[in-house]
Amino acid sequence: MGKEEPEGLTETPVIDGAGLTPALKETKGEPSKQTASLPDTERGRQDPSGGTNLDRNRPFPPSKPGSVYLLALLLALLLFSFHVVVILDVVGELFGHEAWLLAHLSRLAGEAALLGCFFVLFAAHFIEAAAWGLFLRWTRLFPSTLEGIYFAATSATTLGYGDVVLPRPWRQLGPLIAIHGVLLFGCSTAFLFVILQHVWAQQL
């Protein structure tokens, strides 16, 4: 007398569109239940609520581009003001101690003053690129701050590699950052030229 096989689930191959994937199917005429998992890209984005977590890095709605551009213009004006303060106050304070430099460094006073100006301006431009990067990350146009800084730096220096671009309708931010960067670098270049003239005239 043979033993009856227990009713249960048997594994049968089911085509899921990407090849044969094992799936479980009930034996007594019940509808088949496919338990094949989602692809890794979809499973990684799925949240516990059953939907997909796509809003975490979503940029501002395209219906409100004006607010982002207005904030970008305000940030540009703020960074212009910051650059002016750096040039007139910080570097001006450095040259206010010209007598001290001459007394303690003698022939190296001019070189020390120029190096100080270079380092201060380099730090200023780095801070400005970082500010743009933080802005781009805050507006969720880039997934990370470092990527935003990279885009801002390549735009401000007009390198324009093109490996990182903004989506529509935010592409106008790239030229805006580029114009802002060109003006700031031009201001820094003119200031360094004035400093060189002063050093040569004073024979520091």
Image (cartoon, helix red, strand yellow):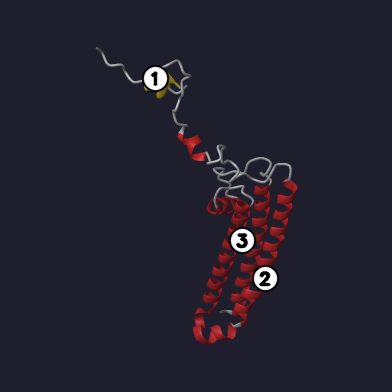
- Per the image, label 1 sits on a secondary structure element best described as strand
Q: Residue 119: x, y in percent?
A: 54, 69
Of residue 141 and residue 122, the one placed in the foreground of this image is 141
Nearer to me, 128 or 89: 128
Q: Residue at x 62, y 79 (%)?
A: 93
| The image quarter in which residue 182 lies | bottom right
Residue 128, quarter of picture: bottom right
Dot 3 or dot 2: first in sequence order is 2
Q: Position of residue 72 (x, y in %)?
A: 70, 54
Element carrying mark 3: helix
Task: Tell me, yes or no, whether the two marked residues, 3 and 2, touch with CB atoms within 8 Å.
Answer: no
Are there few (<14), some (14-19), or many (20+) residues within 10 Å of tag 1? some
Q: Label 1 vs label 3: CA separation?
A: 59 Å
Residue 13 - label = 1
Amino acid type, label 1: Pro
Q: Badge 3 is on which residue? A: 128
Question: What is the C-alpha distance between the residues marked 3 and 2?
Answer: 13 Å
Mark with earlier residue (2, 1): 1
Q: Which mark is residue 85?
A: 2
Q: Nearer the viewer, mark 2 or mark 1?
A: 1
Q: Please tell me which residue is depicted at 46% across the width and 18% down the height of the picture.
A: 30
Q: Quadrant of the N terminus?
A: top left
Question: Which element is circle 2 on?
Answer: helix
Q: Is residue 157 above or below residue 167?
A: below
Quadrant of residue 13 within the rendered picture: top left
Residue type at mark 3?
A: Glu
